[in-house]
Amino acid sequence: MTEFSFNQTGKSNAEVKIILASGSNFRSGKFISEDEVAALKNAAKKQNFEGKNGTFAEINNGKKQIILAGIGNKSTSLSQQILGGKIYKKICNSTNAAIYIPTDKKNQLSLTETACNIALGIELGGYRFDKYFTKKSADSYPKLEKIDFYGEEKIDESKYPAYQALASSVRYARDLCNEPANNLTPEIYADDIERLDYLNIDITVLEEDKIHDLGMDMLLSVAQGSVNAPRVAVLQWKGNKDSKEFDIGLVGKGVTFDSGGISLKPSANMGDMKGDMTGSAVVVASIKAAALQKLPLNIVGVVGLVENMPSGSATRPGDVVKSMSGQTVEVVNTDAEGRLVLGDCLWYIQEKFGVKRIIDIATLTGSTMMTFGFEYAGLFSNDDKLSADLLKAGEQTGEKLWRLPINADYDKMIDSDIADIKNCGPRLAGGITAACFLQRFIQDGTKWAHLDIAGVDRDEKGHPLTPKGATAFGVRVLNQFLRHMK
Ligand code: BES
Ligand code: MG
Ligand code: ZN
């Protein structure tokens, strides 16, 4: 991660100097010399710089690089973070940079918030997963090490650790999601999660025998075709000392690889299914962020970690299994495995911890991906307030959600002829019937929301805050939601 300092003053000697501006008439104090100001004004004019968010004007003569970065009018936390991501691209080949933030009436956010947002954007946009390259030359790696912020007024640097907590948690989740499935089996993954106990997160890992004793046969039916045994990891963050109850439960799908099982997927892009554990990584990382930020909440997370493989011991289409809830399920398609894992985890979290408010998150259906492309995650819920709060957090963070309906008519589509439920309906409304399946494991009086992040879990092209590869979509929206939860 990048090293930041927040209260530099006077003239900067950094390799690259950046000045935030909402118009061509910028202020820069003593940050650069008068000659440089004149040259930069000239450049701004020639390059038609008007200060719009995310636009740049610059002087770059090989030796000296001075950049005007447009922050625009009425910037938001999100637009400032995106600007940070864009700034990262401009400066990543220098080892150090300095950023000047003027006092500006057009900026509704404080200097402190602005600096923190830009820094967060740099940390999110500057993420890379390069551990498996052995032959790349040193030149092809980004060089950026340190950034100094210069504020026209004092920046309160004590605010930054909360942003840094979010950045490091998102990056942690992306690392987990990008990791190939041969190096992230359920067992390895659970061991990794256990290392978070240094943050005073209470972690329990349930192994196969225990999962069996609990009656989570629906989850086990997914794992039984793989040589890699399943795990269920339970994470508790108790930041609300006034209460013994849990304020919220988080449940995540952790299918470390989804081949489809006997209902085998086509081979094209099957490798992307190493990311079918994104929901679980988002849950784990959200609890990591909450612990780093010391949020005054009691949060319990349950993640079901399994590998879905075809083999002689795999579940067959047509098999009937019993869930922990006692309901029987006909597995008509072994590729609809995520809901089998989640159903037992949802039941377990309610039974064991008595949580009355739950959010689950999962790369659950190709159907939701077809609906929204890479723009929105699907939101399904039995509670309007919970939905509204999540939708708002989505808008604020840019991890956008869109609510879809669930009702009795859709629910009927997963009635089975030979058991209580079947694990998928007809081809129609696949994201919705998947949500209906999950709802059959929600007890009366539990407020519940389900986020289907299939599609948005990866970025194919790369954006300012999400370089190509795993996005860890969900960590930012859940952190925003948890920090403002009432
Ligand atoms: N993991 C997939 C869903 C998925 C698809 C995630 C694309 C990310 C990108 C899930 O387990 C699955 O296979 N769902 C099936 C369900 C169907 C068989 C009812 C699907 O959506 O095709
Ligand atoms: Mg599947
Ligand atoms: Zn899956």
Image: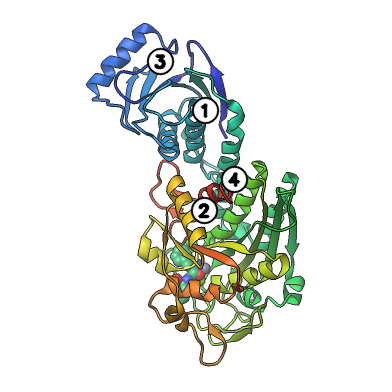
SS assignment at label 3 = loop
SS assignment at label 4 = helix
Up/down of 81 relative to 376, above or below: above
Q: Residues within 10 Å of mark 4 (few under 14, many from 20)?
A: many
Can you identify the residue that label 4 sits on? 169
The residues tagged by marks 4 and 1 sit, at their Cα atoms, a distance apart of 21 Å
**Which kind of residue does numbered mark 3 sit on?**
Ser
Give residue 205's quadrant in the image.
bottom right
Residue at image x 45%, y 45%?
396
- Can the viewer see residue 299? yes
Foreground tag (3 vs 4): 3
| Residue 158 at x, y percent in the picture | 62, 29
Residue 112 - label: 1
**Which kind of residue does numbered mark 4 sit on?**
Ser
Q: Residues within 10 Å of mark 3 (few under 14, many from 20)?
A: many
Sequence-wise, which precedes: disc 2 or disc 4?
A: 4
The residues tagged by marks 2 and 1 sit, at their Cα atoms, a distance apart of 25 Å
Sequence-wise, which precedes: disc 2 or disc 1?
A: 1
Can you identify the residue that label 3 sits on? 28
Q: Relative to the observer, which residue lies in front, 239 or 427?
A: 239
Residue at image x 37%, y 30%?
71
